[in-house]
Amino acid sequence: MGRNKIDYRLADPVHINPGEPAMLKTTLRRRALGLAVAAAVFVAAGPALAQATKLRVSTIPIIDTAPLQVAMAKGFFKDEGLEIDTTPMAGGAAGLPALAAGQVQIAFSNIISTLLGAKQGLGFEIVAAGSGTADKAPDFGGLIATKAGGIKTGKDLEGKRLAVNTRNNIGWMYAREWVRSTGGDPDKVTYVEVPFPQMPDAVRGNRADAAFVMDPFMSAAVEQGDVQVIGWPWSDVQKRVPIAQYVATRSYIQQNPQVIEKFVRAYNKGVDWTNANKGSDEWLRIISGYTKLPPERIKGLVLPPFEKTVDPAALDRVVELMRKNGMIEGAFDAKPLLYKTATQAPR
């Protein structure tokens, strides 16, 4: 007999003759009632006993992925019948090759890498919002320089070195636009690749004249007093920059639409919880647990806005800047890359 079938016949049948006592009939009725109750309990427990759907998700251990980690810690994915296996990556761009190869089903990636991959025909689509910036500074990333260096504007950076984590990507592009918007020629600046943790020392040691650095490294550097923030490339160039999102391939989405909706619904619960509990002891424990930052350091960070949808108009602006900086050519409409769960939260 199959595991999910119930034999409603009595294991120890009782045959009643017309002349037998009524008490025996009562016993039979009680046995039948017991079987009915057991069957109801079995059916009700069925979904809970069903095997969870496993999802491999590439992520980065930074503050931007807080809602994902919260949703895992609070059991929101489990409630949707999902088991999340995270694969840490050094950066958002690193997760996309794994996504294209089917090694992960969902990747957290910056918008530039996602758009470039989609332009190359890799079939990427955005399924959930990730991290972005607010309407005005301070942001969670800024341009730092030494106080003694005298650098204040993009014009001051001409002929000098500006540290970015990766050339030809999102930080590099917004740093160039900041230089242009503050009177400088971005092509007269030398861009050097430096990992975020090493940027403050690169500026102090004169290996770079300025650096576009993210928190927690920006806040830590400023606290020491020898460097200062000279500009905010995110909000100075564009309000509410859609920096990073969760991405899947079109083929996986088409084959697993319900899984995607479950993922986004659980993730959005993580967004709601995060926004409602920022700074609480439980929130600090969760963030400290995966970033390995001490809670006292987390308290001082500038937090990115956590949202549940992506603004299509913001993508148009990103594409415009990419074309302006020679990163993309020809006609390209980014809006079709937004799967429905990214523009309208599933219920």
Image (cartoon, grey):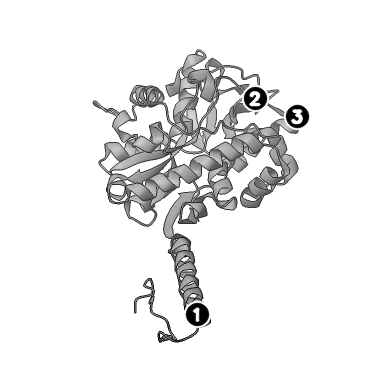
Marker disc for residue 22: 1
On the rendered structure, is 222 left or right of 88? right
At x 44%, y 36%, the residue is 167
> Which residue in the protein does label 3 denote?
225
Q: Nearer the viewer, residue 25 or 206?
A: 25
Q: Amino acid at mark 3?
A: Gly
Q: Nearer the viewer, residue 28 or 122?
A: 28
Q: Quadrant of residue 218?
A: top right
> Which residue in the protein does label 2 denote?
229
2 or 1: tag closer to the N-terminus = 1
Q: CA distance from mark 3 to mark 1?
A: 92 Å
Residue 77 point in image, percent of width and height: 50, 51
Residue 100 point in image, percent of width and height: 32, 50
Q: CA distance from mark 3 to mark 2?
A: 11 Å
Residue 183 point in image, percent of width and height: 50, 12
On the rendered structure, is 48 left or right of 322? right
- Do the numbered discs 3 and 2 sit on residues whose CB atoms are within 8 Å? no
* Mark whose residue sits in front, 3 or 1: 1
